[in-house]
Amino acid sequence: MMLAIKFLQVLIMPIKILTLILYLTLPSIALAAGTISGTVTYRGGATVDAVVYIEDTAGEFAPPKEHLVMDQKNLTFIPHVMPILIGTTVNFINSDDVLNNIFTPSWAGRKFNLGTYPKGIVRSFTFDRLGEVVILCNIHPEMEAYILALKNPFFAVTDKTGKFTISGVPSGRYTLRTWHEKLKPQTKQISVMENTTTTVVDFELIR
Ligand SMILES: [Cu+2]
C-alpha cells in the first residue's frame, strides 16, 4: 500500500512542477507581447467609433464565454460600434420604457430579426460569420448600430479623441486595417516586436 502511494506521488510530482512552470511563464509571455496604439483622424479632427484591427494572424481564437451586451437606451443603441471576435454571442437588452425591435438586413448577420420586446427581456444572437452587421430597430428608423465580426481578438474602437490601443499582440508583421461606417477603409503594414512597448500607427481617413 505504502509503495503504491509513493509510486503515485512520484507520478504526480512532475505534473505539479509542469503546472507551476506554466503558471510562472504565462504572464511573462503576455508581457512580452506588444501594444499598437495611435490616433484616427478625418480632416484634422478626431474620428470616434472607428475600428482598428489586425487583418490576419496565426492561431485560432475561442470566442469569449461571457456574452457581450448591446443596450437600447433613450432610443439609442449602446455601443454604437462593437467589434467582436467571430463566434461571440451578444445579448440585446431594452432599457427603454417603450418597445424596441432588433433586426438586421445584413447577410453577415443572416438577416435576423429578434423581434419587438419591452424592458427586461434579453434576446441573444451568436455571430458566426465574418463582416459588418448593421443593427436596426423597425419602430425607430433613426436607431442604428454596427457589429463587426472579426477573425481575431486584436481590435479596438477609437474614443472621443480618436485614440485606440490594441494590447497583447504577439510579435510579427501584420496588416492593420480600419473600418468606419462612413469613411473608406485604410491599411498599413506594421511590425510588432518582442518585448517592445508600443508601435504607434496613425490613420488619416478620407471619404
Ligand atoms: Cu427602437
Image: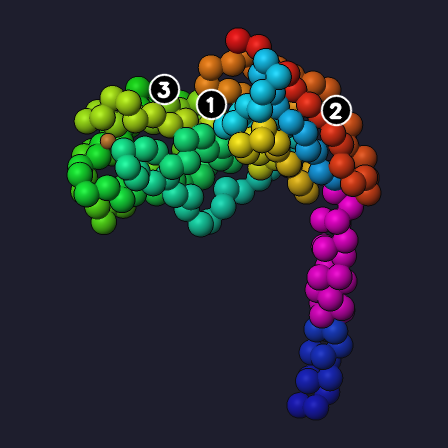
Residue at image position (41%, 36%) is 79
Q: Earlier in the sequence, mark 3 or mark 2?
A: 3
Give the magenta range.
14-33
Q: Which residue has dot 1 on it?
A: 131
Residue at image position (19%, 27%) is 139
Q: Which residue has dot 3 on it?
A: 107
- Decide whether the magenta segment is chiefly helix, strand or loop: helix
Frontmost residue, 172 versus 39: 39
Q: In which quarter of the image is ligand 1?
A: top left
Q: Which mark is residue 155?
A: none
Residue at image position (21%, 46%) is 119
**Is residue 86 visible from the viewing direction of this image?**
no
The answer to whether residue 96 is left or right of residue 3 is left
The answer to whether the residue labelled 3 contacts the one labelled 1, judged by CB atoms less than 8 Å apart, is yes
Q: Which residue has dot 2 on it?
A: 190
> Outermost residue, bottom direction?
2
- Residue 181 in magenta stretch: no
Instruction: Give the CA separation, mark 1 to mark 2.
Output: 22 Å
Instruction: Give the CA separation, mark 3 to mark 1.
Output: 9 Å
